[in-house]
Amino acid sequence: MGKPELRGRDVLWRAVRGQRRSVALGVLLGACHQGGEAVVPVLVGLAIDQGVVEGDAAGLMLWLGVLAVVYVGLSFSFRYGARAGERASVTAAHLLRVALVERVLAPEGGAEDGRLPGELANIATEDAKRVGAVSMAVIVGAGAAVGLVVGAVVLLRISVTLGLLVLIGTPLLLWLGHLLSKPLERRSETEQERAARASGVAADLVAGLRVLKGIGAEPAATARYRGISRDSLSATLRAARAEAWQNGVVTVLTGAFVALVALVGGRLAARGDIGIGELVSCVALALFLIGPLSEFSWVNAELAQGRASAARIAGVLGARPAVDTAPPPHHPGADGPPPPVAGRLRLRDLSYGPLDAIDIEIDAGETVGVVAADPADASALLHCLGRRADPERGTVELDGRPLTALDLAQARGAILVAEHDADLFEGTLLENVVAAAPAGARVDPEAAMAASGTDEVARSLPDGAGTAVTARGRSLSGGQRQRVALARALAADAPVLVVHEPSTAVDAVTETRMAAGIKEIRGGRTTVLVTNSPALLAVTDRVVLLRGGRVAATGTHGHLVGVHADYRTAVLA
């Protein structure tokens, strides 16, 4: 997982190989079923020869009894073969979904880059389902192949001409079916991409519905989704036309082939080369061949769609990690327990995105504000501090060691980045607050709730801190969600806490209370407030102003307000 060289064929092979027992059982039972069906016309022909042509009643009853036994076997093999195929399909799809979710949630990141959440959900559901269905296609294809082989052998015993006709014509039909599946594969891939895009945009619009209504942007959002959905519909119709065209052409070719077999068999019977029972068997076998050949057409379509979906799954599973997950092999302290984190931060000549040669030093226990005139600067800084990305040049150091020299989990455990748009989880309000709190944390959850103003939120709810919160915290207002998210960050009691704009949706009184609470509860702990809020900046020890990707000024909030025009514009405008 996570290897860039992963390809769609690897995903297909992994899905089938992972269910090899169920697939093997399905192939065995499917082969028995198709072989049995191919034998039925022969038994019917024997019954006709002995019971009708020769008048042998005992022989007729014997072959009818054999037919009854064969049909019992056909029922058993179909039932349990289908069950094995379905088990393999749904289990493979489930395992792919688990692998996709693990990759998306992996600490190294990278899988979500360039993909909307709804698109990832579509890949984990529809694409995984299509790839899982390849297991059933393998079982059906193997059974159809056995049916064709048995039918060809029987025809060879009846007539070499008929047997050779089937043995030569069947591979030709399969090759033509494979060629006809190519357009379907291309259009199916486009269809899935457009459908995933439409799902992703729809999910984002629903998530931001309250904001859209607040700014009156519903018509624009509706028009945007209508256009994307129309593109998805067009791609689906093109894929459906390709599938219908393929099925239609394969059906015509199959029918012509079966008619040719029946015609040749009839001419042989007319010349006396084969008997009446053998003629009946030939015609019945020709009709039987429609089934396996049609199944091959279905298998080709399933494989075409499975390959397209597998390529999309491989794109997620093989996405290049945003950061390395492990430190260099011989960094200091690699052989022993990690030393205690003091919390001293140093950004040394850091360049990433819009940031250019940033140098910032933060002492352990210091509270520092960072004001970014451009939100892109703040976003890039948060990415580097949270190790969602590594700098293009320079380093972020914690207690004198580069973050890249630390294990990823260790780095993120030491530096907690609480972003502005952090979501809440389904559960109670208190469960959200203590979600990231380590065992033995020095910060009491009640203290964190009081410092962030979440205690007021709890008092306004029917069951207090035990009130259930819906997914993403949508049952709370924007300001309430911000206070709960801040309480969660404070309760985590990280050695270094980086908070991004925690008070944009609260009133001035609450914001002042939150600023004082952060200062008090984080006493002795390193805290970085990335914000343009004067109330929050007023409680910091000093402030760093970023402008144009560089450090433009450093000083206390009061000093910078008095002497720096760009700073005043950033925090007071």
Image (cartoon, rainbow, N blue to C red):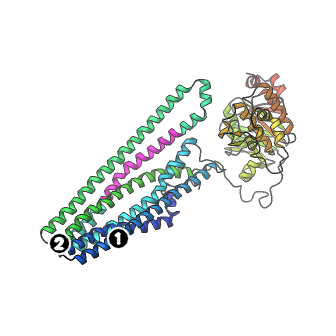
Q: Position of residue 46 (x, y in %)?
A: 24, 73
Q: Which residues are magenta?
A: 172-199
Magenta stretch mostly in which secondary structure?
A: helix
Is residue 243 visible to the viewer in this orientation of the structure?
yes
| Callout 1 secondary element | helix
What residue sits 80% from the left and 48% below the top?
A: 400
Residue that badge 1 annotates:
70
Q: Which disc number belongs to residue 534?
A: none
Crowding around mark 1 (Cα neighbors within 10 Å: few <14, some 14 to 19, many 20+) is some
Q: Amino acid at mark 1?
A: Val
What residue sits 43% from the left and 38% below the top?
A: 233
> Would residue 68 appear left or right of 326 to someone viewing this image?
left
Q: Nearer the viewer, residue 556 or 198?
A: 198
Q: Nearer the viewer, mark 2 or mark 1?
A: 1
Q: Residue 191 lies in magenta, yes or no?
A: yes
Residue that badge 2 annotates:
275
Q: Residue 6 lies in magenta, yes or no?
A: no
> Would residue 319 appear left or right of 326 to someone viewing this image?
left
